[in-house]
Amino acid sequence: GFVNGLTLVMLKAQLTHFQSAGKYLSVLSAEGRATYGCALLTMALVKFGIPKLQEKIEAAKAIPPTLGGVILSAMAAKYFAWPVKTLADVAGSETFRGGLAILPRLGLPSSFWAPLMSAPLKTVKIILPYAITMAAVGSIESLLTLQLLDGIVDDGKRGSTRKEVVGQGIGNLAAGLTGGIGGCALIGQSIINAQSGGGISRLSGMSMAIFLALGIVSFAPLLGQIPIVALAGVMLLVCQSTFSWSSLRLWGKIPKLDY
């Protein structure tokens, strides 16, 4: 139920990238052909092309199929001038301007301190229920994701639930102090990480965060040129591999009250 529910949520989120004004793009239009074609190209490269290349060329194993597929699709879209939306088009060019100026500043915003200083008890009463709810939901999702990854990696070891929760709490506190927002484990990115070989190292998650930060600071304009549907293609493959297809055989056996 957990993985199937999240799969449907991820699928719905990805399908929005194939729409314009609330309607799916037509394959007869230039934008539609480019959008669907770019996504299919990425999926084919990740699923078949790059793995086949890695079987023949040992050095190719250094590049994860997902990364290679997205890069090649972005290069094809740029070279053939496909009319596809890029990350910069969706998030805005200002988001991908790069440089040290985009780094967050240490400290809480004034919008937090003003009500807390004027009416501390009232402010705490407003914040506390939401904080407890978010912490509980985030912890539950992270622990369920951890359980799922233990089954995928299947190396005979089990992840520490205590370390997961404590680490998430410290990370969210640090995010709040730098003007960020709280978060939890992301099943899509976690599965990509495990399938790319990152599951064998505890440093893989930290490496992803470090390289993402370096990319945003140093290579933001370049990252902004990546077609959004190339990333959507990767997530569609994650949906396909995450969904528990064997559970469909129980469709007629589960009481309607449990749906």
Image (cartoon, rainbow, N blue to C red):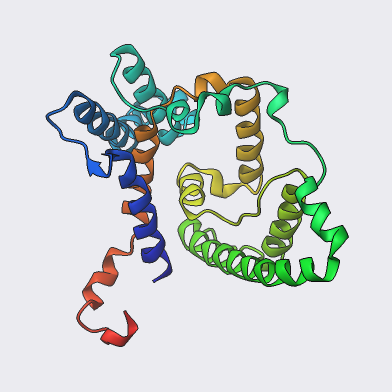
Q: Residue furthest top?
A: 79
Relative to 27, does residue 202 appear above or below in the rendering?
Answer: below
Q: Residue at x 37, y 30 (%)?
A: 69
Return the residue nearer the eye: 117 or 222.
117
Position in image of residue 80 (x %, y %): 28, 13
The image quadrant of residue 25 is top left
Q: Residue at x 61, y 43 (%)?
A: 204
Return the residue nearer the eye: 241 or 232.
232
Q: Residue furthest right?
A: 117
Position in image of residue 19 (x %, y %): 27, 40
Q: Residue furthest front?
A: 118
Return the residue nearer the eye: 10 or 167.
10
Is the C terminus in the top left, top right, bottom left or bottom right quadrant?
bottom left
Q: Residue at x 39, y 53 (%)?
A: 10
Position in image of residue 3 (x %, y %): 41, 64
Relative to 153, does residue 64 appear above or below in the rendering?
Answer: above
The image quadrant of residue 16 is top left
Is the N terminus in the top left, top right, bottom left or bottom right quadrant?
bottom left
Position in image of residue 253 (x %, y %): 23, 84
Relative to 76, does residue 215 appear above or below in the rendering?
Answer: below
Q: Is residue 185 left or right of residue 255?
A: right
